[in-house]
């Protein structure tokens, strides 16, 4: 019976049943899988960028229960090709311009593979010393490329850690800030922890990522105590220090306690950059934790010409950026640096008896379990290490600059066509634009531009997404894919122009 199930892989089932990780079988299958992935990348432009399936499509194609008998890899790969690939939106396509990019690369993939191959769970130093030590070293390397002050590095008093996502990075620093603020309040005012928590107020701009809102909810900061400071075109959607200072002062007069500010370098909508130095001064005055979220644009700051966008970071307590977005490191890899890791540990450490060990008890080592939400953690530093070694900082900078140059080129193309307008200044590789509506357009170009985006995406040639800036529907073209070249952006411009003509002639 399992002869049948194992068509095409002689003896496969037998060894899978007795030895799920047989080295020779693994070698054979993994080579097959590498070929499959290489072919996928080679052929990626033959697929519509946005998956064209309808919700629930897969249920109709797959059995209702798991198979009883082992199945052959070839049969499964056939299903991947015929049933899964149609439901994939091709993030690695050179014609993917949506959201922010997510980078796969050869080096990142190899590192990820190695991490999977070791299969360790490095929550404490003792659970795999290399995992902790390599992460500390690689985060120092990357911190130096970003010209972070020494205080953020493990060679200073701080340190870096790899989180899965920016959302987790923001949450853990908010929890550290909350712990510090609640302790101070209970001591100074003799109130309960519960009462103290109710007084805490967090601040960010209305352009901050929704993960700040989510972190507040998880941290028990009520939405009433999360201030989303309004921004507008007059500051290019960056936060105004004057408005922030006024809001904070009013809260203090009202008996509340400001404890946390998240500034943004490269907002999700338009890549706006907050004035870090001024924000840092306000935080200092009120004793607030200052976090900088640079998930996308932080990557560009490894180039000296973009580094000024991080000026003022020396006044921050913490900073995160996502190498998985734009630094050739396969998802997931979000790097977080803090000046005082003891505050993270104070908020997040647990010390159950089954994890106790000599090195931890004697404070000789970092145990990254105390710098994050979960206990278990992957050996993610391998992929970042491989990326930094196989491309070198010269290669990484060239990679970023190439995308920014292509973005500049697209911006110039846009300016040649008066039917379009640019909605926010371009600082990196994101362009925000829209089709100008007619003067009497009842919804100010909203449905016109929404139709344009839908027409482009359902065509399958390119994928783009949108935002709303100053109440106006805005198309975002984010450049940063590992396969994206100038010719792809030229081709995108052609399809955008032609769909725009179709719409305007309707
Ligand atoms: C993409 C992005 C995030 C969210 O990133 P995750 O890693 O998916 O949580 C947060 N902040 C900014 C500014 C972003 O651009």
Image (cartoon, grey):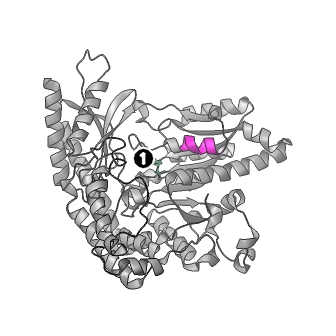
| Figure check: 60 above or below 16 | above
The foreground one among 250 and 471 is 471
Q: In this view, does 466 lie to the left or right of 238?
A: left
Percent of width and height locating residue 489: 20, 49
The foreground one among 306 and 421 is 421
Which residue is at a point 55% across and 34% down the rendered structure image? Answer: 228
Image quarter (top left, top right, bottom left or bottom right) of the C terminus: top left
Percent of width and height locating residue 346: 72, 59
Image quarter (top left, top right, bottom left or bottom right) of the N terminus: bottom left
In the orientation shown, which residue stands out farthest toward the front?
A: 1
Which residue is at a point 37% across and 73% down the rendered structure image? Answer: 2
Which quadrant would residue 116 be assigned to in this image?
A: bottom left
Which residue is at a point 52% across and 68% down the rendered structure image? Answer: 378
Find out whether residue 302 is within the magenta segment.
no
Category of crowding for the residue at label 1, using alpha-carbon neighbours closer than 10 angstroms: few (below 14), some (14–19), many (at least 20): many
In the orientation shown, which residue stands out farthest toward the right?
A: 190
Which residue is at a point 22% across and 48% down the rendered structure image? Answer: 48
**Cβ of mark 1 under 8 A from ligand 1:** yes
Q: What secondary structure characterizes most of the magenta part? A: helix
Name the residue that disc number 1 marks. 266
Percent of width and height locating residue 352: 74, 67
Q: In this view, does 101 lie to the left or right of 371?
A: left
Q: In this view, does 104 lie to the left or right of 120?
A: left
Q: Is residue 227 visible?
A: yes
Find out whether residue 218 is within the magenta segment.
yes
The foreground one among 462 and 233 is 462
Q: What stretch is highlighted in magenta?
A: 212-222
Q: Is mark 1 on a helix, strand or loop?
A: loop
Which quadrant would residue 322 be assigned to in this image?
A: bottom left
Q: Can residue 279 be seen in this view?
A: no
């Amino acid at each position: 019976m399992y002869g049948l199930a194992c068509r095409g892989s002689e003896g496969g089932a037998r060894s899978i049943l007795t030895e799920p990780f047989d080295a020779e079988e693994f070698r054979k299958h993994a080579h097959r899988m590498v070929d499959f992935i290489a072919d996928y990348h080679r052929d990626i432009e033959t697929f519509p960028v946005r998956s064209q399936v309808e919700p629930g499509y897969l249920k109709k194609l797959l059995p209702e229960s798991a198979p009883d008998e082992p199945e052959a890899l070839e049969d499964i790969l056939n299903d991947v090709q015929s049933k899964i690939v149609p439901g994939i939106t091709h993030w690695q396509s050179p014609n993917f311009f949506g959201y922010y990019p997510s980078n796969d690369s050869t080096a990142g993939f190899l590192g990820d593979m190695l991490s999977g191959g070791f299969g360790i769970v490095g929550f404490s130093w003792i659970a795999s010393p290399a995992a902790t030590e390599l992460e500390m070293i690689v985060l120092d390397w990357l911190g130096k490329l970003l010209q972070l002050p020494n205080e953020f590095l493990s060679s200073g008093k701080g340190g870096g850690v790899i989180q899965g996502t920016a959302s987790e990075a923001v949450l853990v620093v908010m929890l550290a800030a909350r712990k510090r603020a609640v302790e101070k309040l209970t001591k100074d005012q003799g109130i309960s922890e519960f009462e103290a928590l109710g007084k805490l107020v967090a601040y960010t701009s209305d352009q901050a990522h929704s993960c700040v809102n989510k972190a507040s909810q998880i941290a028990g900061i009520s939405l009433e105590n999360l201030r989303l400071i309004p921004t507008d075109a007059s500051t290019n959607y960056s936060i105004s220090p004057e408005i922030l200072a006024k809001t904070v002062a009013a809260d203090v007069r009202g008996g509340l306690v400001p404890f946390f500010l998240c500034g943004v370098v490269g907002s999700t909508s338009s890549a706006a950059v907050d004035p870090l130095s001024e924000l840092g001064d306000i935080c200092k005055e009120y004793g607030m934790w200052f976090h900088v979220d640079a998930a996308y644009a932080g990557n560009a700051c490894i180039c000296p010409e973009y580094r000024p966008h991080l000026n003022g970071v020396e006044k921050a307590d913490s900073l995160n950026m996502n190498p998985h977005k734009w630094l050739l490191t396969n998802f997931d890899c979000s790097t977080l640096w803090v000046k005082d890791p003891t505050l993270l540990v104070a908020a997040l450490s647990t010390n159950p008896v089954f994890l106790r060990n000599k090195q931890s008890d004697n404070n000789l080592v970092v145990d990254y379990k105390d710098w994050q939400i979960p206990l278990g953690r992957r050996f993610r530093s391998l992929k970042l290490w491989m990326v930094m070694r196989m491309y070198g900082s010269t290669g990484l900078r060239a990679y970023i600059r190439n995308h920014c140059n292509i973005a500049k080129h697209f911006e110039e193309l846009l300016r040649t066509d008066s039917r379009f307008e640019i909605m926010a200044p371009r600082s990196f590789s994101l362009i925000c634009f829209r089709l100008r509506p007619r003067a009497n357009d009842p919804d100010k170009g909203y449905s016109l531009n929404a139709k344009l985006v839908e027409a482009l995406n359902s065509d399958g040639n390119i994928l783009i997404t949108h935002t709303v800036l100053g109440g106006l529907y805005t198309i975002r073209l984010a450049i940063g894919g590992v396969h994206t070249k100038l010719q792809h952006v030229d081709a995108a411009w052609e399809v955008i122009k032609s769909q725009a003509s179709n719409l305007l002639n309707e």
